[in-house]
Image: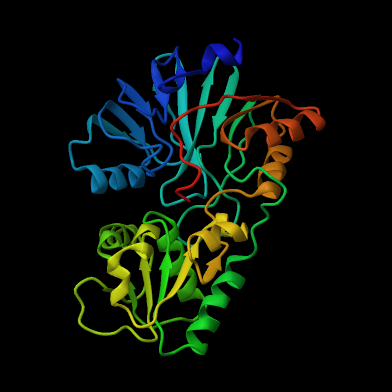
């Protein structure tokens, strides 16, 4: 069996013909395997969905109980037969419940990474390298300029600023699923035990994380509270930083936790006073080190800076193929 006989790109996403399913399809299909709960990978309307229990819980929280015709939960390492294909899920280290899809048939194994990172994260299981014939990788930050610093150092800048400006409110823009909870959990590990205030759109997902055993400490709603929030840390979706919602806070310090804050012009364009380079995606070194560690026969690249990663792989003697899949966001991070 050739790799293209097991998985091939279609407009809907990566399709497995022997199993009759798609991995992270971008439009409704009859059967889907979902790697994680971010909306560019996990969409409502599929006939059947296979995912980790945590990802299914996230999809229910976002889309409602009837987000799919039927669902099947698979724990990490559990093998599910779909037609003539064996499918299992391995930790991806991206967000709570995130998984790599391991697809096997006739002695051929393809691993679809979904989005992943290699950095420690107290809110999710760490990435697990899986030996395979073909590794299907993301490439969101696949340029040598993207080398993410330690998140403790970045959050140390935030805590130093909170101490330096006790009269100001620090509003941290962070993606509502994964990034927000990681920032909170790491702040707790760094010794910050004051209440952290949440934009209303983050409350449900933070509660879901806590229900799955992630301790986030004392959280309070920022929306509707009658106080000036001087000296407080507030988390909100990045879009809220530019909204009238943010104008109610005491002389706010706009912060933004994202790998894109490595690019100073992006921070300047968004009016970010305190950029925090914190990413839930693998950086250049993590991407290349992971491929070397797994040592696949081929690398397929789903989305992102695919040309640079494909060129690096070719120089390393590894066959590489950009898939040019459409529908996966690079900037939401």
Q: In terms of image quadrants, where is residue 226?
A: bottom left
Percent x, y for residue 300? 62, 27
At a point 66% along the width and 52% down the height, the residue shown is 146
Q: Nearer the viewer, residue 317 or 103?
A: 317
Residue 181 left/right relative to 268: left
Q: Nearer the viewer, residue 263 or 324?
A: 263
Say if 188 sits above or below 87 in the image.
Answer: below
Q: Nearer the viewer, residue 268 or 48?
A: 268
Number of numbered discs: 0
At a point 36% along the width and 86% down the height, the residue shown is 230
Percent x, y for residue 195? 34, 80
Q: How is the image coloured?
A: rainbow
Percent x, y for residue 79? 44, 30
At a point 58% along the width and 70% down the height, the residue shown is 154
At a point 72% along the width and 45% down the height, the residue shown is 289
Q: In terms of image quadrants, where is residue 267?
A: bottom right
Say if 144 sits above or below 79 in the image.
Answer: below
**Which quadrant: the N terminus?**
top right
Q: In terms of image quadrants, where is residue 215?
A: bottom left
């Amino acid at each position: 069996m050739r790799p293209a006989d097991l998985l091939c790109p279609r407009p809907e996403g990566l399709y497995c013909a022997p199993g009759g399913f798609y991995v992270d399809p971008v439009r409704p299909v009859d059967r889907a395997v979902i790697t994680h709960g971010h909306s560019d990978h996990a969409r409502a309307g599929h006939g059947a969905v296979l995912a980790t229990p945590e990802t299914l819980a996230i999809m229910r929280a976002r889309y409602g109980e009837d987000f799919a015709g039927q669902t099947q939960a698979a724990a990490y390492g559990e093998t599910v037969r779909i037609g003539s294909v064996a499918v299992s899920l391995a930790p991806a280290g991206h967000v709570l419940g995130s998984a790599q899809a391991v697809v096997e048939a006739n002695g051929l194994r393809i691993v679809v990474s979904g989005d992943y990172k290699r950095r420690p994260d107290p809110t999710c299981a760490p990435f697990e390298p899986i030996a395979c014939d073909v590794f299907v990788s993301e490439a969101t930050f696949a340029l040598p300029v993207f080398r993410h610093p330690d998140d403790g150092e970045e959050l140390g800048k935030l805590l130093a600023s909170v101490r330096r400006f006790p009269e100001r409110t620090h509003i941290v823009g962070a993606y509502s699923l994964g990034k927000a909870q990681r920032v909170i959990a790491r702040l707790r590990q760094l010794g910050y035990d004051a209440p952290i205030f949440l934009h209303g759109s983050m409350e449900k997902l933070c509660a879901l994380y806590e229900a799955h055993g992630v301790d986030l400490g004392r959280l309070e709603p920022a929306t509707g509270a009658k106080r000036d929030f001087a000296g407080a840390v507030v988390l909100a979706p990045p879009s809220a930083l530019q909204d009238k919602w943010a104008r109610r806070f005491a002389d706010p310090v706009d912060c933004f936790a994202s790998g894109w804050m490595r690019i100073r012009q992006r921070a300047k364009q968004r009016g970010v006073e305190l950029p925090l380079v914190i990413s839930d995606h693998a950086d250049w070194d993590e991407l290349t080190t992971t491929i070397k560690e797994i040592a696949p026969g081929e690398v397929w690249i789903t989305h992102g800076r695919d040309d640079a990663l494909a060129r690096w792989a070719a120089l390393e003697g590894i066959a590489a193929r950009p898939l040019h899949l459409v529908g996966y966001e690079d900037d939401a991070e």
